[in-house]
Image (cartoon, helix red, strand yellow):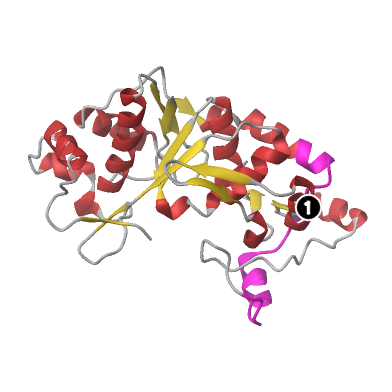
Amino acid sequence: MLTRFAPSPTGELHLGHGWSALLAHDAARGAGGEFHLRIDDIDGSRSREVYVDAALADLEWLGLGWDGAPVRQSQRLGDYDAALADLRARGLVYPCFCTRADIAASLAAPHGPPNPSGAAIYPGTCRPLGAATRERRLADEPHCWRLDMRHAAALAGDLVWEEEGRGMRAADPAAHGDIVLARKDAPASYHLASTLDDAAMRVTHVVRGADLIASTDVHRLLQALLGLATPVYRHHALVCGADGQRLAKRDAAASLASLRAAGIDGRSLADDLRAGRLPAGYSLQTP
């Protein structure tokens, strides 16, 4: 078994991150496997090296050790470019020139239900643009790259993935619409980068929060399109605050650094979490 924990260095880790890292770490160690770290640092406008150092310190404070040097997404840009070029050559992606204002205006009229993640589905404004128009606009207009979901889903056919302990689940990537695979301000989206990275790292079991369960349908599709192995998934309950909302990096009081500064012993906290005991004011909830 090989698991991973993949924080983005855009802020301090909070108790929810610690919980997720602990589950991935203990699953691997309990099976005599490996636990690896990946730093998801391709958001150039928000990633900070100080948060990389802080994340490593937090994990050490919890008593979690990892195997090998952390993998960095910023060192894998060539792999993302190659995958995108492959999909582009097969006619599975198209450039999208829409601004946020353009998309908001196009969505003013009802376009059906949101996708499984709760976001509005992109209406496909740029999908029908002709080749000549695309080439002309690519030369000087900012753009992202979107997956032509109808084409991709039809090509991949019926797909399934395994939720650990719950059996096989049918994937429904088409419900997400034409997702972004490469952003205007980043070389790859979360969907593309995470799918490629997990395969390259040979991750056998992806342990992550239940808020990402819908994303697994998209990742399963990308695995099929790119000929990648499919790991087993385990989506765990989320740590929520007193207001019942899942924790976010803006919740400074829940940061692991704050807990450490308050005199809490990290290894004791990890043992409490293993026993299902959370600090006062926090709870585990499944969306």
Q: Is residue 197 left or right of residue 124?
A: left
* Quadrant occupied by the C terminus: bottom left
Evaluate whether residue 178 shows in this view.
Answer: yes
State the extent of the magenta-drawn residues as a range.
86-112
Q: Is residue 99 left or right of residue 151?
A: left
Asked where in the image residue 49 lies, by quadrant, the reply is top left
Q: Position of residue 66 (x, y in %)?
A: 34, 22
Decide whether residue 103 is among the magenta residues: yes
- The residue that disc 1 covers is 154
Decide whether residue 197 is among the magenta residues: no
Q: Residue at x 78, y 62 (%)?
A: 126
Q: Residue at x 47, y 25 (%)?
A: 71
Q: Is residue 151 left or right of residue 206?
A: right
Q: Is residue 249 above or below residue 115?
A: above
Q: Residue furthest right?
A: 132
- Residue type at tag 1: Ala
Q: Residue at x 61, y 46 (%)?
A: 160
| Residue situated in front as seen by the camera: 73 or 132 | 73
Q: Residue furthest bottom?
A: 109
Q: Residue at x 15, y 58 (%)?
A: 281
Q: Position of residue 246 (x, y in %)?
A: 32, 58
Q: Position of residue 46 (x, y in %)?
A: 45, 46
The mark tally for this picture is: 1
Q: Position of residue 141 (x, y in %)?
A: 75, 55
Element type at mark 1? helix
Q: Residues within 10 Å of mark 1 (few under 14, many from 20)?
A: few
Q: Is residue 232 left or right of residue 144?
A: left
* Quadrant occupied by the N terminus: top left
Q: Is residue 118 above or below residue 165?
A: below
Evaluate whether residue 43 shows in this view.
Answer: no
